[in-house]
Amino acid sequence: MTVRLLHTADWQLGKPFDKFAGDTGPLLREARLEAVRMLARLANEHQVDAVLVAGDIFDSSSVSRQTITFAIDAMRGFGGPWILLPGNHDAHLAECVWTRILRDGCPPHLRLALEPSPIALTDDRLVVFPAPLCARRTHDDLTAWMDGAEGPVGAARVGLAHGAVEGRLPAAADAGNPIAADRAERARLDYLALGDWHGTLQVAPQTWYAGTPEPDRFPQNDPGNALLVAIEGPGHAPQVTRLRTARYDWRMAEIDCTGFEAAAMTEAVAGRLGELGVRERTLLRLRLRGVLSLAARAALGAVLKRLEDELRYLLVDDAELRDEPDERDLDLLRDGPITGAAVDRLRAQATAGTEEDRAVARLALRYLYVEARGPA
Amino acid sequence: MRLRRVTISNFKRLQGPVLLDELHDGLTVIAGDNEEGKSTVLQALKAAFFEHHGVGGAVREAMQPYGGGTPSVEIAFELDGTTWTLRKAFKRGGIELTNGARSWPPEEAEQQLLSLLRFERRQGRSEQRPEHLGVTALFWLDQGTTFLVARRVEDEPLAIGSGRFGAAVASEIDVAAAGEGTARLLETVRTRCDRYWTTTWRESAVLKQDRETVTSLQGEEAAVRGRAQAQAEKVDRLERLVAERRRRAADDAPSRAQAKLVEARKRVEGLDALDGRLAQIGDQLKAREAEKSRLEALKRDRARVRADIAEAREAAVGLTDRQQTQVTIVAEQQCALQQAEAKETAAQDGLRLATDVREAAQQAVVTLRETHERVRLEASLGTVREAADAARLARAAIAGNRATAERLDAVRRAVGQQQAAHAALHAAATAVELVPEPGRGASRDGVAITGTNVVHLTDRTVLELEGFGRIVVLPGGADMAARRSVSRAADEALRAALSAAGAAEPADADRLARARQAAEVEAKAAESRRDSVLVASGVASAEALSDRITALVAATGQLDPGGDPSAVEARLQEAVTAAERAADRLETARVAIRSGERVLQEARTELALIEQELGGRQRAIDALEARLAETVSGQDDEALAGALAAAGDTWLGLLGERESLLRERAQVEPETTRERLAQAQRSIEALEADRRRLDLDIVMIESELRGGGDDGLGELLAQAEARLAQASEQLGRTSLEAKAWKLLHDELGAAAKATREALLAPIVSRLQPWLARLLPDVEPVLDPATLAPMQLKRGGAVEPLARLSHGTREQIAVLVRLGLAHLLKEREGEAPCLILDDALVYADETRFDTMKAILQIAARELQIIVLTCRPRDYRGLDGRHLRLEDCITRRLVDPAGAD
């Protein structure tokens, strides 16, 4: 009989998002809880045998009681079992979120995988080998014990771990908590459910990162999914289905503004951005580069202001966008002797000195243009 | 601008209406006395042009007419070729502005004025500043303020015109002046900077707030981080402690320590048995030593008693010898005492004899002295009696003589009175000169008159003249009778006085008085002698003296006082000396007796003591012998020696056994053995304590962590970090903006300054001719920011304007206005109206004349109105001359048609 699992990870409940102004931060926090409620609905919908959460359920080992309570409540939507694995954010320490849950009385539908020992489920048709992190970082492969671990005969063998599969992820993700890329093979696992990488990714045969169910950053690595895993029995390749769970669309865009005209700025930017989807759920990181006249830069400023007002969140990186007054700008600025002299000096400073000096001079030039021009 | 007509009503002291009409181009001199309202005219002009008609508060109160009513001003003026009429009453809706072509509603009219005269409206109760008056009012010079030198750019009135003046000359030097647009830009940039900077470029407002936010959040983040770190450290410690507990649980250290304890305890028990036996032997040794000591002490006691008996007997012998010696001494002393007593008796006899001799000698001396006294007293008695006799005789003479001093005085006074009475009578007497013929005589009362021929007659007198007959002369008058009476009374008084003194004549009285005085002297001398002898003899009277002599005679007889007193004294002295020597001998004998008695007593006492000690010794000997006999009777000396030897043997046996046991104990190393047991016990206790401590630490940390767990420090830290990051980014943006605005401000400021400096030369060239008319060879140095003259350059030397006199500064202010007004006339085709309110009061006569000439020249192209209280000073100027009092009309001007 086929074993069905819902594989998820990296909920990082309790992540503050306080860097986001206004009500965006609280909404993003709420969205992560809502993702757990959605997982419960999916688990019911797909009648899974268990939900495997591969670590980093909580953003830290010392989240607030409210965060723990809300998380447990959110999981009540599915009767379980929820197999919860400590990750590097919520490692099983002598005193941690897990000890607090145990002390308060762990609800029956939750199974805390705090020890590296087999967990037999569904009438011994499934055995889960967890590799909990007992420290925030380790250099040992905690999944090694799975190689010699035994489970009930005829049970599907599933590993549950949190860390970086060696050589299969960007270098930055390889910094600790290593997992052998051939662990599934060496431990005769039918499926190795992993967490830590926030995008959905298969890194080896039978080895998947589910990714976070609700994106929390801009990198474009396909976050916002859960994996429905169907295993017919030991030795069968698992069938993995990607289920979309994301509420918010964290999007990145890069625009070269060179040649944009002030008069057609709105259209030019819109054309580069393309369709943005539901704007109340869109967070956009916009990298701008190129060279603009002062008039065009002023127009771009207005467009960006409007965009900021329309989207849930807009982050503009214009470090590589440069202002360069054109003849029309200069005609305007040189209308008076004083502004003309000031423009010449500011232009000189905009190409000399430290990066900050140049940035200050460019901004001053832009201000001068806007003030000299008057209301658009 | 040219003013054509001004009407002022109800404005401060100008009740008015005051009409200044027909104001032409050129010069107009308006005269008025002090306090008549000249300055009010200027204030009314400023109020009409620059204050809102609905202005209230202190500004409105300052215009309040003294006699009530609404302040109102009507002005007809020309500007840019257009004739305007402004009627302003300071009340609601009280403005009317027309230019012939149209008129404006009240608020628009005020706006039109703003744009026409280019000034800023004063807001609220703010202080009036130059920008609230515009360039127009720059040329209206108030009384007594034109010499002031502004300390700040914003206080210099000329600054507000600098842009306009600069623009006027800009084209001449190919530099576009900073127009009003640039001024607005500069002001806008400055305003933008205010969001970030103070006027002295310290961080403020947004920038300061952002930085404070970052600082505050850094503090919060650090605090939360600290707490989170502390919690993490506790968790780490808990991890280590739990690991340690697991390690110890796997270790068998407690059982190893227990085995060691059992082994050590066994060894110590063996050692304890050995020590028990040793203690037992020790006790036996002590008992044996005590018995042995007791027997030895008994033996020593017997020997000591025997020695004491021998010693006591020897001492008794010595005492018996001393007793004999002492008996001898007592006998000798008794003999010596008897001899001394015999000496005393002899001495007493000698003393009595010597005393008798001395007393006899003393009696002889007394007798001799009394005899001498008697003889002396007898001599004194003679003297006393002699003196007493003399005194008695003298007293008898005194008693027979009545001529006392008082009576003598009475006689003398009576003589004087008689003489006076006689003289008075004589003076009144009738003098009769008798000149008898030779051979004839005359008689008076029968008595022949001889000698003198003049007789003085005081009483009836019968003169008989020989050859003539008798003449009875009756000296006349009652006065003569009185004189005669007085004379007779005086005669009678003299006779009485003489009788009292016992004298017949006054001379007798004198003699008798002298004799009485001599007798008194004699009596006193004799009595004095008598009394002094009596006093010397120590008696009060001659009788007492006689009695005393009688007594002496009775005592000593009529001895011859001729004996030698010194011989009698010498015998007395010898007798005294002999008596003293006898007394000395008696004392010596008595001393010897007392000494002998004391020695005898001491000898007897010593003898008694010796006999007492001898008795004591004997009793001690008896007691010692009894005690010795008693101890020996129980155990004789031989038996005692045997018991002593047996006790010594037993003691030596025990000592040997103890030595053997000690050697055995030393081989066991008792200290080490016991220390091992103690160590084993301590090890077990330490292990137990460690275990308990570890458990307690774990419980404590778990408890602490449980307590702090619900704080959600991880979340709090993430939140704090996020907020700090956001604030830091915001600060970075704000800081960049602030720097950009400041840079723009600095660059625009630098450019503006450069432009202003470039514009200075043409403006100076406009001012120069006017200044030169008053101050040749002087060049003004203008402040680039305000165009106000700050210094004067004269032959290379520079002199700050502030150091010049009030008068010179005032004149320069007027000349600068003239220069600037001509500049505007030249460049803009329109010059402002120049109004001077008593503006040259500090000028000396020469300067004043020069300034008048300059004003006359300037008035060819400018409208100049001079308000003065000294109209005669301006006589001779070609222009219109008005008196303010002549301008007061009865016609009420109310532009708004109200009231």
Image (cartoon, coloured by chain):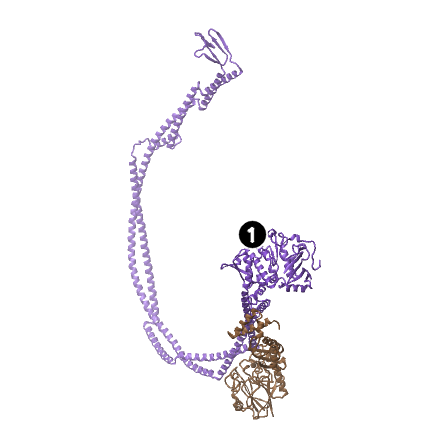
| Left or right, B378 with reference to B118 | left
Check disc 1 and report its element: helix, strand or loop. helix
The quarter of the picture where residue B584 lies is top left
A179 vs B516: above or below:
below
Relative image position of residue B31 (x, y in whole percent): 62, 53
Image quarter where the N terminus of chain B lies is bottom right
Placement of the C terminus of chain B among the 4 image quadrants:
bottom right
Q: Colour of chain B?
A: purple
- Depth check: give the residue in front, B126 or B277: B126
Q: Position of residue B885 (x, y in %)?
A: 65, 52
Residue hosting label 1? B845
The colour one sees for chain A in the rendered image is brown
Residue type, label 1: Glu
For the question of whether residue B696 can be seen, the reply is no
Task: Give left or right: position of B173 versus B89.
Answer: left
Q: Quadrant of residue B522?
A: top left
* Residue that lies at the very extreme toward the top in this rendered image: B467
Circle 1 marks a residue in which chain? B
Please indicate whether residue A200 sits to the left or right of residue B669 in the image: right
Q: Quadrant of residue B723?
A: bottom right
Where is residue B341 shown, x and y percent of the image?
30, 48
- Position above or below: B595 against B397: below
Residue B318 visible somewhere in the drawing: yes
